[in-house]
């Protein structure tokens, strides 16, 4: 029995509509899958993006040729350490003077502050506040300890006859090459006239070797008079300028 013409038309129309709907649903599914993959890739890229806290070394020249420049004050040391503590970074301080007579670098390290999830719950916010307050208090204690250690070091050493910059450069380079330092931005602030001047019976060294400092280290100088000054090193007019630079290095 043959199908009436109008029934055949309805059947064809329904079949066409069903196929069209299937194609639309398939296209939507593919778009959703593509969107999910792109979204997941973006999330992965963002989560894997490295953020590096600064590791700062400050050295001050205590030789006779630089005794007209006062050493960093307690307020300056605290400002620098506080800026580093806000990032969970590291800080070190040392002197430039007679060979093997200025001691090791004074060191400080700080705990990174916590961060809230993108969509925090009430419990998340409570835990975040408690952790933030606890870590902030701990870092404040570490800042105070670091500043006092620096002042003690400065009180022990004054008016050295020699300027052994190369020796301190070696110490700074070693510091930045220690295990784990690859996770930090290396920053070196050198307060000195820049003249290597060691004239002793056991050692004579008057040639400055700035190449001792690794090229990946961000170097800033203050009080520098030596014509030898690498092009990638930055001159600073005053130690006070360092604080704003440190805050600009805060990982985002």
Image (spheres, helix red, strand yellow):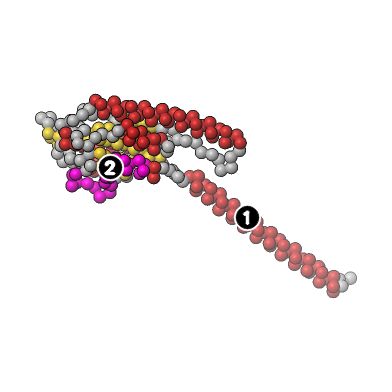
Residue 230 within the segment the image draws in magenta: yes
Q: Quick check: can you spot residue 48? A: yes
Extent of the magenta region: 225-246
Q: Residue furthest right?
A: 1
User: Eyeballing the image, is 36 above or below 210?
Assistant: below
> Is residue 93 shown left or right of residue 206?
right
Query: Residue at 39% of width from left, 38% of height from top?
Result: 83
Number of other residues with Cα within 10 Å of mark 1, as a class: few under 14, some 14 to 19, many 20 or more: few
Q: How far across and down, in percent of the image, does residue 227 sit?
A: 18, 47
Q: Quadrant of the C terminus?
A: top left
- Label tally: 2
Q: Is residue 178 or residue 112 the one in the foreground?
A: 112
Q: What residue sits right under mark 2 in the picture?
A: 238
Q: How far across and down, in percent of the image, does residue 39 sit?
A: 56, 51
Mark 1: secondary structure: helix
Of tags 1 and 2, which is closer to the observer? 2
Query: Residue at 35% of width from left, 37% of height from top?
Result: 80
Q: Quadrant of the N terminus?
A: bottom right
Mark 2: secondary structure: loop
């Amino acid at each position: 029995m043959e199908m009436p013409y109008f029934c055949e038309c309805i059947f064809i129309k329904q079949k066409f509509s069903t196929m069209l709907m299937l194609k639309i649903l398939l296209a939507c599914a593919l778009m959703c899958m593509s969107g999910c993959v792109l979204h997941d890739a973006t999330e992965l890229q963002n989560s894997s993006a490295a953020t590096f806290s600064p590791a700062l070394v400050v050295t001050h020249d205590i030789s006779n040729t630089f005794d007209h420049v006062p050493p960093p004050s307690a307020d300056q040391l605290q400002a620098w350490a506080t800026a580093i503590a806000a990032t969970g970074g590291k800080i070190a301080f040392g002197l430039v003077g007679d060979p093997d007579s200025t001691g090791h670098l004074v060191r400080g390290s700080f705990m990174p502050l916590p961060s809230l999830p993108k969509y925090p719950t009430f419990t998340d916010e409570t835990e975040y506040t408690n952790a933030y307050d606890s870590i902030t208090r701990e870092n404040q204690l570490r800042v105070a300890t670091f500043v006092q250690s620096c002042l003690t070091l400065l009180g022990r050493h004054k008016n050295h006859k020699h300027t052994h910059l190369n020796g301190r450069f070696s110490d700074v380079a070693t510091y930045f090459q220690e295990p784990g330092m690859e996770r930090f931005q290396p920053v070196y602030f050198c307060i000195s006239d820049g003249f290597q001047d060691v004239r002793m019976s056991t050692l004579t060294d008057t040639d400055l070797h700035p190449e001792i400092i690794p090229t990946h280290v961000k170097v800033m100088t203050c009080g520098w008079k030596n014509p030898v000054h690498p092009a990638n090193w930055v001159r600073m007019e005053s130690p006070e300028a360092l604080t704003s630079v440190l805050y600009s290095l805060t990982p985002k």
